[in-house]
Image (spheres, grey):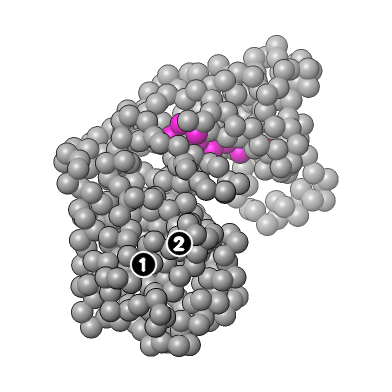
Amino acid sequence: MNADAIPVTILSGSLGAGKTTLLNHLLHNAGDLDIAVLVNDMGEINIDAALVSDNSELSVADGGVTELSNGCICCELQDDLNEAVVRLAQNRDFDHLVVESSGISEPEPVARLFTTESRAAALYTVDSLVTVVDSRLFFDAFGGEGIPERRDTDDADTRPLSDLLIEQVEFSNLVVLNKTDLVTDEELETVAELVRALRPDAELRYTSHGALDPHELLGQHLYNPQTAADAAGWKQALAADDEHDHSHGHSHHDHAHPEAVYGVSSFTFRARRPFHPTRIAALLGDLPRGIIRSKGACWAAGCGDNKLVFGQAGPSARIEVSGPWIASLSELDQELYKANRPNLDWDDEWGDRRTELVFIGTDLQEATVRENLEACLLTNEEMAADWDAFENPLPTELGDLVVLAEP
């Protein structure tokens, strides 16, 4: 790693969560720390950059606040971002770069720019991925009254806001719970527990009006590219249960996770028998309200040799084909794959075909949800039937995606 690399903090959070207020507070209270800010806004006019530059020593003109406008930082502006940060490093001397990504982008693609083979990666090192959460909105969305739909401009990706709120938390190293003055202590603790369930190793900071000491946010050294992909709570839950239990039954209970004080918990459902396509589609499209996040692989009859991946965040649920089951490949390919994955859980009859779903939420009705999932598995009679004859609302071709629920 380059010892002279400039640390970068990537700041995410939904529109209105308080990112700009937090940024202004950082700039006002930076002391002898020289912070450069790069702001990305979805609109034609970069309102955030104007707000930040008005309130700081650095102005847009002298390159301290660099604007990227009219696009989202994680997709079409990737090249601009690379050039902007390289230009910043060449033209100015500063101690820390803060990149504020638009309210509708995930932090991960931005982090990737600084960790892959790019000119930016040679000059910078990612310090932390920070997500600002509106505590009131988050509680109302996942502990309370339903969530607003994601309002994109001309973005083709029209996923609901709930997906994004959850993914931003799952990708973050440090979560700022902002607007704490708008929630009760108990509501705030519920939000904190939800955040810990979504991203167990994230550090939490509490604030109202973005008033956070720069030293509590910058220079935290929390980002690790090696472990970043596996740190989300649902992945950790699967891994923990995997180590704990490798039995090969028709399906089984995994070890229970300790109940959290405010009822936030998780459990994993596994089965070595396929789901009936119409029954599982109906169930996954209408999960109990308390489940805020569920994700994993599904084996369903009538989908050929395709592995399905299911993902749900709040009121939004979708299922898609992720590729073939290894057991459906040629023997040579199977052996190659197994050689690279010594821990692959392989069944003598079905190979890697299995369902593994993690559920995270508040007051989970685990016994009921498990019972309902079990009822979606094929009966012995159905196992012997022609699976392709079943009515099938699920995706069956690579790249296909079916929305099972939306706000």
Q: For mark 2, what is the residue?
A: 45
Q: Residue at x 72, y 17 (%)?
A: 391
Q: Residue at x 26, y 70 (%)?
A: 55
> Residue 325, how many percent across, how many down?
72, 40
Q: Looking at the image, do the residues carrying marks 2 and 1 touch, with CB atoms under 8 Å apart?
A: yes
Task: Compare residues 313 and 84 and report the one nearer the observer.
Answer: 84
| Identity of the residue drawn at 60% across and 50% down | 343
> Which class describes the residues within 10 Å of circle 2: few (<14), some (14-19), or many (20+)?
few
Q: Which region is colored magenta?
A: 307-316
Looking at the picture, does residue 102 appear above or below residue 245?
below
Query: Going 22% across and 38% down the picture, which residue do you hit?
Result: 187
The quarter of the displayed image where residue 394 is located:
top right
Amino acid type indicated by mark 2: Ile
Q: Main secondary structure of the magenta part?
A: strand
Give the numbered dot on residue 50.
Answer: 1
Give yes or no for residue 336 being in the magenta stretch.
no
Q: Is residue 314 magenta?
A: yes
Is residue 302 visible in the rendered image? The answer is: yes
**Left or right, residue 158 beside residue 178:** right
**Could you tell whether 67 is left or right of 333 in the image?**
left
Outermost top residue: 381
Please determine whether, in this image, residue 4 is positioned above or below residue 35: below
Residue 363 horizontal/vertical position (percent): 32, 28
Q: Secondary structure at mark 2?
A: loop
Q: Answer yes or no: is residue 298 visible.
A: no
